[in-house]
Amino acid sequence: MSTNYITDDIKALIGAETGLIEAGHPVEGSEIRRFHHAIMDAAPRYWGDESGRYGGAVAPPGFPVHAHRRAAKSADPLDQAGEPDFDGVSRSLREGLPAVNVPLPRLLNGGYEYELFQYAKVNDRIFVKSRYEDIYQRDGKTGPMVFILIEDTYLNQRNEPLVKTKNTIILR
């Protein structure tokens, strides 16, 4: 096996989690319509048919993930470009989680798994909590790869689950 990047400090990150982080604003009907157009799903539930089973517009199932964008007044990640050690890739993988400081130059998205519970509705507040589920290393054809598994749970203001995602990030 090549260099072992899973040090005691990296192992200590497994299980680290954030508190609840609120999206910048409540779910809005106009946002739902834009998201609906982007995914090209013609389902009437996204248009707010009051007689429908949801009693109004609901957001597409993946919407909560995209409700958490960089806040309007937060620092631009590219502001780090002038720093001598900045390689263009941030190791701060989620707001509130500690950085995974592994000196491998490439970061790849290894995919997502979604578990859907219910639709977000207009005026819902969306919260997320994230946690490092696992961090491990494997050797690939081109050298070592570090896998970071992150679980994100999206909830509404009533603490009801909307979506749970598992994201695999690969450093190599």
Image: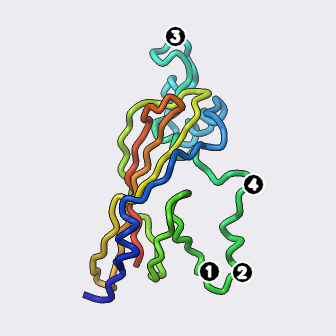
Type of amino acid under label 3: Ser
Question: Which x, y percent locates residue 15?
Answer: 37, 59
Callout 1: few (<14), some (14-19), or many (20+) C-alpha neighbours within 10 Å? few
Q: CA distance from mark 3 to mark 2?
A: 55 Å
Q: Could you tell me residue 101's position as x and y percent? A: 48, 76
Can you give x and y, in whole percent of width and height, for residue 29 in the image? 64, 29
The label shown at residue 82 is 2
Identify the residue position indicated by label 3 in the image. Answer: 51
The disc labelled 2 sits on which kind of residue? Answer: Gly
Measured as percent of width and height from the top left, residue 50 is found at: 55, 13
Question: What SS does tag 2 mark?
Answer: helix
Q: Amino acid at mark 4?
A: Lys
Spot the residue most to the bottom.
2
Write the residue at 29% across / 89% down. Answer: 2
For numbered disc 4, what is the local secondary structure?
loop
**Disc with the residue nearer the chain's start (4 vs 1):** 4
How far apart marks 1 and 3 lie (CA) works out to 54 Å
Label 2 neighbourhood size at 10 Å, few (<14), some (14-19), many (20+)?
A: few
For marks 3 and 2 on the same chain, the one whose residue lies earlier in the sequence: 3
Q: Is residue 55 above or below residue 148?
A: above
Marks 4 and 3, how far apart at CA: 39 Å
| Mark 1 vs mark 3: in front | 1
Residue 86, labelled with which disc? 1
| Residue at the image point whose x is 57% and y is 42% from the top | 38
| First in residue order: circle 4 vs circle 2 | 4
Q: Earlier in the sequence, mark 1 or mark 3?
A: 3
> Do the residues under discs 1 and 2 have CB atoms within 8 angstroms?
yes
Residue located at (48% from left, 37% from top): 155
